Image (cartoon, rainbow, N blue to C red):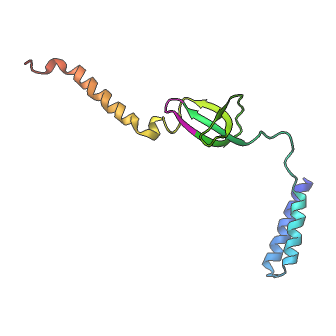
């Protein structure tokens, strides 16, 4: 509760300073330094390690180097010569039908094959 009260008091004081058109930057700098002192840094030791990770889409054989916190025991050498943590993927944007447009093509081929199968008996015999 006390922290919220100080934060609201800081906001109110800053608002009043800005409304009164005071051009003194020293007042604003002082207020900002007080506010920064009230903020606390993140707790150490509880956040996962954010690092570049090499993701491999095995169905499209495409590699992605992306920042991630995923934990893996595997590593792989990338084309830039560095070794990164490695994660194998079954599907990514390189192989998913929504992104590649292959879904429509498959549906069309399936419809044509289904049509030919269904109406093959109606075709005139040569």
Q: Position of residue 76 (x, y in %)?
A: 65, 33
Q: Magenta segment: does it hold 89? A: no
Q: Position of residue 69 (x, y in %)?
A: 71, 38
Say which quarter of the image contains residue 38: bottom right
Residue at position x 24%, y 20% from top?
Answer: 117
Q: Which residues are magenta?
A: 58-63
Residue at position x 84%, y 48% from top?
Answer: 42
Q: Quadrant of the C terminus?
A: top left
Question: Which residue is most to the left?
Answer: 126
Q: Is residue 12 left or right of residue 98?
A: right
Q: Is residue 110 left or right of residue 43?
A: left
Q: Is residue 36 left or right of residue 48?
A: right
Q: Position of residue 29 (x, y in %)?
A: 86, 72
Tally the marks. 0
Q: Is residue 23 left or right of residue 103?
A: right
State whether residue 121 is above or below residue 68. above
Q: In front here: 116 or 72? A: 72
Say which quarter of the image contains residue 118: top left
Question: Which residue is most to the right?
Answer: 2
Residue at position x 79%, y 76% from top?
Answer: 18
Q: In front here: 57 or 15? A: 57
State whether residue 101 is above or below residue 36. above
Q: Magenta segment: does it hold 60? A: yes
Q: In front here: 19 or 119? A: 119
Q: Position of residue 56 (x, y in %)?
A: 58, 34
Residue at position x 53%, y 29% from top?
Answer: 58
Q: In front here: 35 or 85? A: 85
Q: Main secondary structure of the magenta part?
A: loop
């Amino acid at each position: 509760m006390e922290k919220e009260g100080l934060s609201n008091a800081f906001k109110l004081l800053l608002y009043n300073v800005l409304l009164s058109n005071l051009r003194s930057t020293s007042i604003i700098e002082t207020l900002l330094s007080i506010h920064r002192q009230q903020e606390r840094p993140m707790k150490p030791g509880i956040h996962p390690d954010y690092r570049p990770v090499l993701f491999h889409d095995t169905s499209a054989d495409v590699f992605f180097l992306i920042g991630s916190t995923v934990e893996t025991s595997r590593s792989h050498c990338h084309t830039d010569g560095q070794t990164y943590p490695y994660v194998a993927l079954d599907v990514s944007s390189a192989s998913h039908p929504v992104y590649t447009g292959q879904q429509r093509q498959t549906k069309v081929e399936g419809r044509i094959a289904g049509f030919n199968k269904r109406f093959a008996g109606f075709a005139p015999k040569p």
